[in-house]
Amino acid sequence: MTIMFHVSEGLFFRRNEDGSVTVLKTNDGKEPLTDVPPEDTNVAFAQTLDDGSWCSVVLSMSAFSERPGDWYAWMKHHKGEVDLLEGKRGGY
Protein backbone atom coordinates (compact mmCIF):
# COMPACT_ATOMS: atom_id res chain seq x y z
CA MET A 1 0.00 0.00 0.00
CA THR A 2 1.27 3.48 -0.80
CA ILE A 3 1.41 6.32 1.69
CA MET A 4 -1.85 8.13 2.18
CA PHE A 5 -2.44 11.84 2.65
CA HIS A 6 -4.42 12.44 5.84
CA VAL A 7 -6.62 15.55 5.73
CA SER A 8 -8.40 15.41 9.09
CA GLU A 9 -10.63 13.27 11.26
CA GLY A 10 -9.95 10.02 9.42
CA LEU A 11 -10.25 11.35 5.86
CA PHE A 12 -7.48 9.99 3.63
CA PHE A 13 -6.51 10.33 -0.04
CA ARG A 14 -4.24 7.92 -1.88
CA ARG A 15 -2.87 8.22 -5.40
CA ASN A 16 -2.79 4.79 -7.02
CA GLU A 17 -0.24 3.52 -9.54
CA ASP A 18 -2.69 3.96 -12.44
CA GLY A 19 -3.28 7.63 -11.53
CA SER A 20 -6.66 7.04 -9.92
CA VAL A 21 -7.26 8.45 -6.43
CA THR A 22 -8.91 6.59 -3.58
CA VAL A 23 -10.80 8.60 -0.96
CA LEU A 24 -11.26 6.86 2.40
CA LYS A 25 -12.89 7.70 5.70
CA THR A 26 -12.05 5.69 8.81
CA ASN A 27 -14.14 5.36 11.93
CA ASP A 28 -11.31 6.00 14.40
CA GLY A 29 -9.20 8.51 12.43
CA LYS A 30 -6.29 6.09 12.01
CA GLU A 31 -4.77 5.11 8.66
CA PRO A 32 -6.62 2.06 7.29
CA LEU A 33 -4.97 -1.29 6.73
CA THR A 34 -6.81 -1.67 3.44
CA ASP A 35 -9.27 0.37 1.41
CA VAL A 36 -11.86 -2.31 0.74
CA PRO A 37 -14.63 -2.71 3.30
CA PRO A 38 -15.53 -5.09 4.92
CA GLU A 39 -11.96 -6.45 5.03
CA ASP A 40 -11.10 -3.50 7.24
CA THR A 41 -14.09 -2.85 9.47
CA ASN A 42 -12.56 0.50 10.42
CA VAL A 43 -13.21 1.85 6.90
CA ALA A 44 -16.54 3.69 6.87
CA PHE A 45 -16.28 4.83 3.25
CA ALA A 46 -14.00 4.07 0.30
CA GLN A 47 -14.34 5.31 -3.27
CA THR A 48 -11.82 5.25 -6.10
CA LEU A 49 -12.04 7.92 -8.81
CA ASP A 50 -10.35 7.41 -12.16
CA ASP A 51 -7.68 9.97 -13.02
CA GLY A 52 -9.96 11.97 -15.33
CA SER A 53 -12.72 12.23 -12.74
CA TRP A 54 -10.23 13.22 -10.03
CA CYS A 55 -8.77 15.95 -12.24
CA SER A 56 -12.24 17.28 -13.02
CA VAL A 57 -13.22 17.37 -9.32
CA VAL A 58 -10.08 19.31 -8.35
CA LEU A 59 -10.51 21.79 -11.21
CA SER A 60 -14.23 22.26 -10.61
CA MET A 61 -13.69 22.99 -6.91
CA SER A 62 -10.92 25.55 -7.49
CA ALA A 63 -11.63 29.29 -7.35
CA PHE A 64 -11.44 29.65 -11.13
CA SER A 65 -13.42 26.46 -11.77
CA GLU A 66 -12.84 24.36 -14.85
CA ARG A 67 -12.36 26.30 -18.08
CA PRO A 68 -11.95 25.01 -21.65
CA GLY A 69 -8.55 23.39 -22.08
CA ASP A 70 -7.75 23.25 -18.35
CA TRP A 71 -8.64 19.58 -17.99
CA TYR A 72 -6.23 18.49 -20.73
CA ALA A 73 -3.37 20.59 -19.33
CA TRP A 74 -3.86 19.36 -15.76
CA MET A 75 -4.23 15.73 -16.90
CA LYS A 76 -0.75 16.03 -18.41
CA HIS A 77 0.45 17.47 -15.09
CA HIS A 78 -1.27 14.68 -13.09
CA LYS A 79 0.32 12.01 -15.31
CA GLY A 80 3.77 13.57 -14.91
CA GLU A 81 4.10 14.54 -18.58
CA VAL A 82 4.32 18.31 -17.93
CA ASP A 83 5.08 20.25 -14.73
CA LEU A 84 2.69 23.20 -14.83
CA LEU A 85 4.14 24.51 -11.57
CA GLU A 86 7.79 24.54 -12.67
CA GLY A 87 9.49 27.59 -11.22
CA LYS A 88 6.43 28.53 -9.17
CA ARG A 89 6.71 26.26 -6.15
CA GLY A 90 7.27 28.12 -2.92
CA GLY A 91 7.06 31.52 -4.57
CA TYR A 92 3.45 31.84 -5.53
Image (cartoon, rainbow, N blue to C red):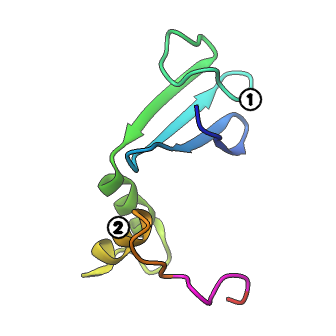
Residue occupying image coordinates x 50% and y 9%: 38
- Front residue of this view, candidates 59 and 90: 90
What is the magenta range? 85-90
Say what amino acid the circle numbered 2 marks.
Met
Q: Quadrant of residue 81?
A: bottom left
Mark drawn on residue 75: 2
Quadrant (top left/top right/bottom left/bottom right) for the C terminus: bottom right
Percent x, y for residue 88? 62, 88
The residue most toward the left is 68
Packing grade of label 2 (10 A; few <14, some 14-19, many >=20) is some
Percent x, y for residue 76? 35, 71
Q: Main secondary structure of the magenta part?
A: loop
Above or below — where is 8 with respect to 24? Answer: below
Q: Of helix, strand and loop, which one carries label 2?
A: helix
Position of 87 compared to 91: left or right? left
The residue under label 1 is 29
Please tell me whether residue 89 belongs to the stretch shown in magenta: yes
Foreground disc of the pair 1, 2: 2
Say what amino acid the circle numbered 1 marks.
Gly
Quadrant (top left/top right/bottom left/bottom right) for the N terminus: top right
Residue occupying image coordinates x 67% and y 22%: 27
